[in-house]
Amino acid sequence: MAVLVGRKAPHFKAKAIVNGGEEKSDFSLDQYLGKKKVIFFFYPKDFTFVCPTELHAFQENLAEFEKRNTAVVACSTDTEKSHWGWLQMEKSDGGIKGITYPIVADTNKTISKNFDVLKGDYFINENDQLETDNEMIAYRGLFLIDKEGVVQHQLVNNLPLGRSVDEALRMVDALTFVEENGKVCPANWKKGKEAMNESHEGVADFLSKH
């Protein structure tokens, strides 16, 4: 698993469904450069069980991300048509109707591969046929990307393990605090709590108070 933290997020252009039903043919995270932070998260498959709980949880907290000048973008290896169909289904039926943030269609799996969250691999067998060693879908990867396009935080869960939206918000708050104050955030730091300076004296002073 590659560590992308500290590096530019991989560039891509792909089809996506935006605003809950509009197809966009050349969606890119480049539109946010210099303007917004981005929470870019992968989920395994449309029309499944854990995935809609995550997508709805991000939607329910979308206003909180927007307050923090942060865009939320989802991605899976399903097609844009599959995304669109799932968006027409009511939440009570297992659908994701009501999701308004973009959902990217990584149909050729290159985005998942470049972010190194693609499960499975492929090879050419003795009959010159393409085979895979597993279902090629995305792990539950999450990337916090700053306004310069640099990955500042990444998290990758296995397929059964849903993520915490509260933790994603906490990391956005931590990054914003560091950018604005030049301090560092200790363990379990939350917005409104005291931080520390990077110097030895600053750390010692912080620890003496806790």
Image (spheres, helix red, strand yellow):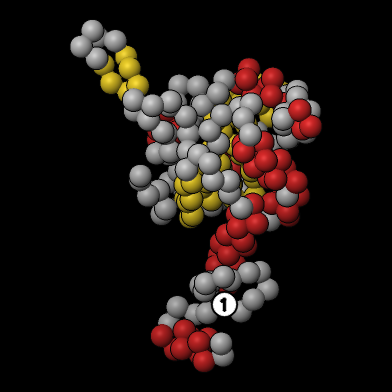
Residue 61 vs 88, above or below: the answer is below
Front position in the image: 6 or 141: 141
Q: Which residue corresponds to the image point at 53% horizontal and 50% vertical from the top-left?
A: 144
Front position in the image: 63 or 42: 42
Is residue 189 toward the left or the right of residue 197 in the image?
right
Front position in the image: 180 or 188: 188
Q: Which residue corresponds to the image point at 24% horizontal and 9% vertical from the top-left?
A: 128
Q: Position of residue 130 (x, y in %)?
A: 32, 14
Tag 1: amino acid: Ala
Q: Position of residue 178 (x, y in %)?
A: 55, 67
Q: Which residue corresponds to the image point at 53% horizontal and 41% vertical from the top-left?
A: 160
Q: Quadrant of the C terminus?
A: bottom right
Question: Can residue 30 be seen?
Answer: no
Helix, strand or loop under label 1:
loop
Q: Quadrant of the N terminus?
A: top left
Q: Please name the residue that numbered disc 1 is placed on.
A: 195
